[in-house]
Image (tube, grey):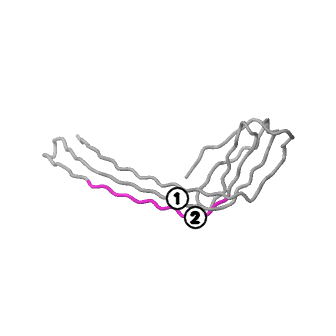
Amino acid sequence: MRWHQVSLPDAPTDSTDCQAGTPGSTANILRKKTSEGDCTGLAYWGGGEIVWAFHHPPQGTRWSVGLAFEAMKIDTDGDQTQYWYGDDPISEVDDTGSLISGIDYEIESSQTALKVFVACRF
C-alpha cells in the first residue's frame, strides 16, 4: 500500500509509506501533530480472468468478452507514536514537543473486484 507524501509548512515532511513491516506516518493539520506507525503482518493478493475470443479472418475484426476477478487482504499489527509539532488549538496547554508512544496500531483491509469486459481488436 502506498500513500501520498505529506508536506506541511511548519512540520517535518515524512513519507507515508505503510507497507507491511515498514514505518508510516500521517499528519493531522488541525491538531498540529504527526502519527507514525510501525507494523508487520501479511498481505494476500490473487485473481484471474476468463476470456472468450471470437476469431475472424486474419484481416478482420476480432471480438472477445471476458470475466475477471481480483481479491486482496491486508492484516497487520504494530505500535504508533504521536508527536505534536505545534500547539494543539483544542487543548488548554502548549502541546508543542509532546509525544505519546506505544499506541496499538492495526491495519486491516479486504478488497474484491469483479470485472466484465468486451474487447474489439482491429
Residue at left offset 61%, top offset 54%: 18
Magenta span contains residue 8: no
Residue at left offset 61%, top offset 63%: 40
Q: Earlier in the sequence, mark 1 or mark 2?
A: 2
Q: Is residue 93 left or right of residue 119?
A: right
Would you call the spot at circle 1 few (<14 residues within 10 Å), some (14-19), or many (20 or more)?
A: some
Residue at left offset 45%, top offset 57%: 72
Q: Is residue 54 left or right of residue 96?
A: left
Q: Amino acid at mark 2?
A: Gly
Q: Which residues are magenta?
A: 38-50
Magenta span contains residue 45: yes
Q: Is residue 51 left or right of residue 80?
A: left
106 or 114: which is nearer to us?
A: 106
Q: Residue furthest bottom?
A: 41
Residue at left offset 41%, top offset 52%: 112
Element under label 1?
strand
Are the residues tagged 1 and 2 within 8 Å (C-beta)? Answer: yes
Element under label 2?
strand
**The C terminus appears in which quarter of the rendering?**
top left
Q: Quadrant of residue 89?
A: top right
Q: Which residue is denoted by mark 2 in the rendering?
A: 41
Q: Which residue is denoted by mark 1 in the rendering?
A: 74
Residue 121 x/y as whole percent: 24, 42
Q: Residue furthest front?
A: 92
Residue 36 x/y as whole percent: 70, 52
Residue 27, compared with residue 9, is above or below; it is below
- The Cα–Cα distance between marks 1 and 2, rounded to whole angstroms, is 8 Å
Residue 2 x/y as whole percent: 57, 50
72 or 121: which is nearer to us?
A: 72
